[in-house]
Amino acid sequence: MIRPADLLRETPEGLWCEPGGFFIDPVRPSGRALITHGHADHARAGHGAVAATPQTLAIMDARYGAEFTRFRQPLDYGETVRMGEVSVSLHPAGHVLGSAQARLEWKGLVITVSGDYKRRRDPTCARFEPVRSHIYVSEATFGLPVFRHPDDAGEIARLLASMRANPGRAHLVGAYALGKAQRVIALIREAGHDGPVYIHGALSALCDLYRDQGVDLGDLRPATMKDGEGQTTDFAGQIILGPPSSFQTPWARRFPDPVIAFASGWMGVRARARQRGVELPLVISDHADWDELTATIAECAREAVWITHGREEALMRWAELQGLEARPLSLAGYDEDGE
């Protein structure tokens, strides 16, 4: 009888596939790694060989340089390859550009590792596709029933309404450099704002990469005090995006009476918004909320669900009530709070 642990098991380095000879998103350098997406807690430099979508490989190149691995193996969505004794394919996860679920098949057993994912539409990346499996390994970042994210368009409408109500103030929006910043910009464009969006220098390289991958972000300009012709930039009534870490630096104090906004699923927790000094919390998440998590498990898990890096207790209980086996995975080194 085949045991699931014979195909995939947790180790201090990450999920290890013995018959395939590779780790999934290992937290330390390994001989061979299958990477689900480009966020730094999942995609690290120093592996001997990396298999990932072409977009994720490009993100790792942009972040770490061309020498981040000795060998790259690009895998398109839906392409099946043999890694050792295991048939491996990647399927859209809807998290960020290039993000993927990893489907492993060996001796008739199918296990799919979700990586990070969301179910709602995102104009900057391929939409999540359900992958039916004997065992589905799901993240649980927002794995409590209290987390039900509002409509993205409604949150962007709140941002644009605040701009109209405060024409003399800059709107400084905190957004993580990979995925969230580009998604917020694209949603602003879809809402009809075609004026310039100013960005912190830390966002430039990844915004350029998204554009190279065919994502239209419109008129982006550096958030500097002087424009390209040496004229002083007037930021009143403008949108400026920067990584959250930049809000505590002198860079953030150059803008006129800014409205501080932050785009994150955690902005649904009022205490977190107050703690960060956020005047305009925007609940825009790149992770599945409770309803999306439960819908995904119901759709994808035939027999069991393994739950990782998140709040697993409530989700495990829900799965057990649906007749599924459920267990938590103790994987260290992944950011449970970050987006």
Image (cartoon, grey):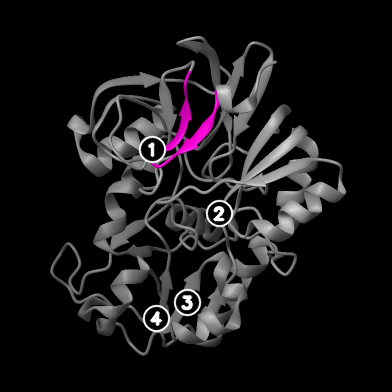
Task: Give percent across and percent down for residue 197.
Answer: 39, 63
Task: Give percent across and percent down for residue 196.
Answer: 39, 63
Determine which residue is flagged by label 1. Answer: 26
The residues bearing labels 4 and 1 have C-alpha atoms spaced at a distance of: 41 Å
> Closer to the camera, 229 or 212?
212
Task: Give percent across and percent down for residue 3.
Answer: 65, 23
Determine which residue is flagged by label 4. Answer: 170
Determine which residue is flagged by label 2. Answer: 286
Task: Give percent across and percent down for residue 77.
Answer: 54, 23
Mark 2, residues whose alpha carbon is within 10 Å: few (<14), some, or many (≥20)?
many
> Closer to the camera, 233 or 10?
10
**Discs 3/4, front:** 3
Determine which residue is flagged by label 3. Answer: 261
Q: Amino acid at mark 4?
A: Ala
Of helix, strand and loop, which one carries label 1? loop
From the viewer's perspective, tell me whether residue 47 is left or right of residue 39.
left
From the viewer's perspective, tell me whether residue 135 is left or right of residue 210.
right
Magenta stretch in the rendered image:
7-18
Mark 3, residues whose alpha carbon is within 10 Å: few (<14), some, or many (≥20)?
many
Q: Amino acid at mark 1?
A: Pro
Of labels 3 and 4, earlier in sequence is 4
> Closer to the camera, 7 or 161?
7
- Residue 283's place in the image compared with 257, above or below, is above
